Image (tube, rainbow, N blue to C red):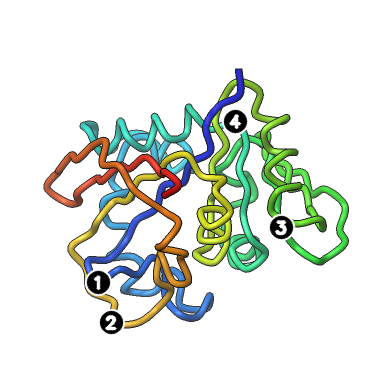
Amino acid sequence: MAGKVFFSVSMSLDGFIAPDSPGELMGRQWMELQRWVFPQRFFRENLKRGGGGEEGRDNDILRETYERTGASVMGKRMFDAGEEMWPEEAPFHTPVFVVTHEKRNPWERPGGTTFHFVNDGIEAALDLARDAAGDRDVRIAGGGATLVEYVNAGLVDEFSVALSPVLFGSGVRLFDGIDAGRIALEPVGVESSPRVTHLAYAVRQR
């Protein structure tokens, strides 16, 4: 049985998931946005940052997201930024399908991550990801424009937002360009921690 297609992002209180420029990733605002992630035990384990770390619901959500994911899809902008910042052992540990016009051979990294470059659009990338994921889920990893393309195409089953108490003022909005007349959301979960509020939704077509 095929798994679900989902995404999971951190978002500022004013609706942004990333700064305007990839060069600003790892800057102050982005670090504040992701502050709930960095102390978690699973984050430290996955990026090989040593032992220790916090346990609790935030940690469980990170681990559950990782464990349900059999393959990921991302846009070229996210890949370009990540190629510079990810450690040699990229944190996915699954096949990743990059939607791009660039022709490139698969790029295999230590630890089980292989990036495949798909030139035939978002549906072709998703088909390949579904095949690779088996009965696990496919995560649309980003960036913002890629997430919206998949939602507008009716290809996303559910998503979660970690709402951080941070204001950006400008940047990449999560739902910039969404076809709101075709998309309906069903709330399926709300969980709070001292650092963040986790919101979960199922996606329906109107």
Residue 99's mark?
A: 3
Q: Which residue is mark 1?
A: 14
Instruction: Name which of mark 4 and mark 1 comes first in the sequence.
Output: 1
Q: Is residue 96 left or right of residue 39?
A: right
Identify the residue at horizontal 17%, vertical 51% (top origin).
195
Instruction: Name which of mark 3 and mark 4 comes first in the sequence.
Output: 4
Amino acid at circle 4: Gly
Of residues 115 and 9, the one nearer the viewer is 9
Q: CA distance from mark 3 to mark 1?
A: 28 Å
Is residue 93 positioned above or below 154 on the image?
above
Instruction: Name which of mark 3 and mark 1 comes first in the sequence.
Output: 1
Of residues 32 and 98, the one nearer the viewer is 98
Q: Residues within 10 Å of mark 2 (few under 14, many from 20)?
A: few
Q: CA distance from mark 3 to mark 4?
A: 17 Å
Q: Is residue 149 left or right of residue 123?
A: left
Q: CA distance from mark 2 to mark 1?
A: 7 Å
Of residues 70 and 53, the one nearer the viewer is 70
SS category of the residue bearing label 1 = loop
Residue 70's mark?
A: 4
Identify the residue at horizontal 11%, vertical 47% (top origin).
194
Q: Which residue is mark 2?
A: 169
Instruction: Name which of mark 4 and mark 2 comes first in the sequence.
Output: 4
Dots 2, 1 in contact, CB < 8 A: yes
